[in-house]
């Protein structure tokens, strides 16, 4: 498939949160023994509180924030047919499009996922207007299977979850993305995107503010936010790499601490964004969204100046 105009920004979005009032029980806020609404499975506490991803008012507010931050596309986490994320996708997509956003799907590694089993689902989603698919953990299946699938599909783009352009090419993918902002710090982005361009692949490296999943999963590995400096360094690397698409990890993956959704600055026992770019108090709550808008504008300005659209 012919790559689209470069200079696009996408953000990974999770529609997997639930509350007893709307969903019959807490969903995803309770990992690692957390007891919402007072305690949630994250080192941060959302400004919205422990919300439901099936609440249209919540989704509408989120999509307006994302659009105002200069993002073009919401990449919605999708855990296969029959999942709550799949059930919520139509509502999320409708509200996102009303906010002027494009919609892509993040194909998660759900049980039984294979290239062959995925094909009818991709065709169904494409018929609903979704044509970009980011395949998480794509290297778990053989390159040959992905290549055969990609050769059968038309009118869609599949992105491999890898930092190796050659690996994406072997699977017949249209592009690649990294997602992981713990392992990838941006240092390899220029080399990765240069290699991708020689192979005519779309390069969509992922940037993020940091990583801290200790409260949600017990994972002891941490990438500190450094008051926003880490987010800046990753964006700077993606811009320097002349990325075709910059993907952001994430809008609201609260468990892993990669979120840029507003967090309460005054919630006891939780971290806040206070100090990021000098912001304090209530102004710190949306500091990462404001910084995203700044970087998205810088990225588009530089991309339009140095990187012509592919033919």
Image (tube, rainbow, N blue to C red):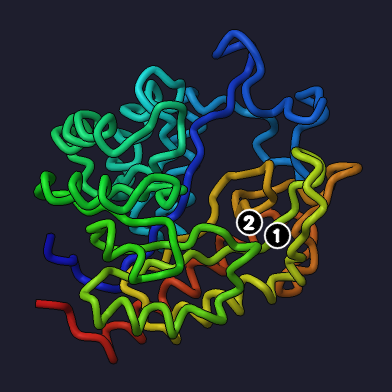
Residue 151 is marked as none
- In this picture, residue 136 sits left or right of residue 91: right
Q: How many residues crowd mark 1 within 10 Å: few (<14), some (14–19), many (20+)?
A: some
Residue 238, x across and y down, in percent: 46, 77
Reading the image, the residue beneath label 1 is: 283
Question: As displayed, is residue 128 above or below residue 290?
Answer: above
Reading the image, the residue beneath label 2 is: 286
Q: Are the two marked residues, 1 and 2, in contact with CB atoms closer than 8 angstroms?
A: yes
- In this picture, residue 165 sits left or right of residue 26: left
Question: As displayed, is residue 254 above or below residue 120?
Answer: below
Q: Nearer the viewer, residue 231 or 32?
A: 32
Q: Nearer the viewer, residue 22 or 210?
A: 210
Q: Farthest residue to the bottom: give it.
A: 306
The quarter of the picture where residue 184 lies is bottom right
- In this picture, residue 74 sits left or right of residue 256: left
Image quadrant where one finds the N terminus:
bottom left
Residue 207, x across and y down, in percent: 53, 66
Q: Nearer the viewer, residue 41 or 157?
A: 157
Mark 1–mark 2 distance (CA, rounded to whole Å)? 6 Å
The quarter of the picture where residue 34 lies is top right
Residue 144, x across and y down, in percent: 26, 50
Question: Which mark's residue is nearer the viewer, 1 or 2?
Answer: 2
Secondary structure, mark 2, is loop
Secondary structure, mark 1, is helix
Q: Can residue 64 be seen here?
A: no
Give the residue drawn at x 81%, y 23%: 35
Q: Nearer the viewer, residue 129 or 142?
A: 142
Give the residue drawn at x 28%, y 57%: 171
């Amino acid at each position: 498939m012919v790559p689209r105009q470069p200079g696009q920004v996408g953000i990974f979005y999770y529609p997997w949160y639930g509350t007893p009032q709307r969903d019959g029980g807490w969903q995803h806020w309770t990992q690692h023994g957390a007891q919402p609404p007072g305690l949630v499975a994250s080192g941060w506490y959302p400004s919205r509180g422990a919300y439901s991803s099936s609440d249209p008012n919540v989704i509408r507010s989120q999509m307006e924030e994302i659009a105002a931050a200069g993002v073009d596309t919401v990449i919605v986490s999708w855990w296969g047919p029959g999942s709550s994320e799949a059930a919520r996708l139509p509502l999320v997509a409708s509200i996102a499009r009303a906010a002027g956003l494009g919609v892509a799907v993040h194909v998660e590694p759900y049980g039984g996922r294979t290239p062959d089993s995925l094909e009818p689902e991709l065709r169904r989603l494409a018929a609903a207007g979704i044509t970009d698919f980011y395949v998480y953990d794509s290297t778990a299946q053989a390159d040959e299977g992905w290549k055969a699938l990609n050769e059968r599909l038309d009118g869609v783009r599949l992105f491999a979850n890898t930092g190796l352009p050659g690996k994406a090419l072997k699977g017949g993918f249209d592009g690649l993305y990294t997602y992981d902002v713990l392992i990838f710090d941006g240092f390899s982005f220029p080399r990765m995107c240069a290699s991708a361009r020689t192979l005519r692949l779309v390069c969509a490296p992922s940037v993020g503010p940091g990583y801290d999943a200790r409260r949600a999963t017990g994972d002891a590995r941490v990438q500190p936010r450094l008051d926003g400096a880490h987010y800046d360094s990753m964006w700077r690397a993606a811009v320097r790499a002349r990325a075709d698409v910059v993907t952001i990890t994430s809008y609201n993956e609260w468990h892993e601490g990669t979120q840029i959704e507003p967090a309460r600055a005054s919630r006891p026992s939780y971290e806040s964004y206070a100090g990021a770019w000098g912001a304090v108090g209530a102004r710190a709550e949306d500091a990462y969204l404001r910084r995203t808008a700044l970087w998205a504008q810088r990225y588009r300005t530089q991309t339009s100046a140095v990187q012509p659209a592919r033919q």
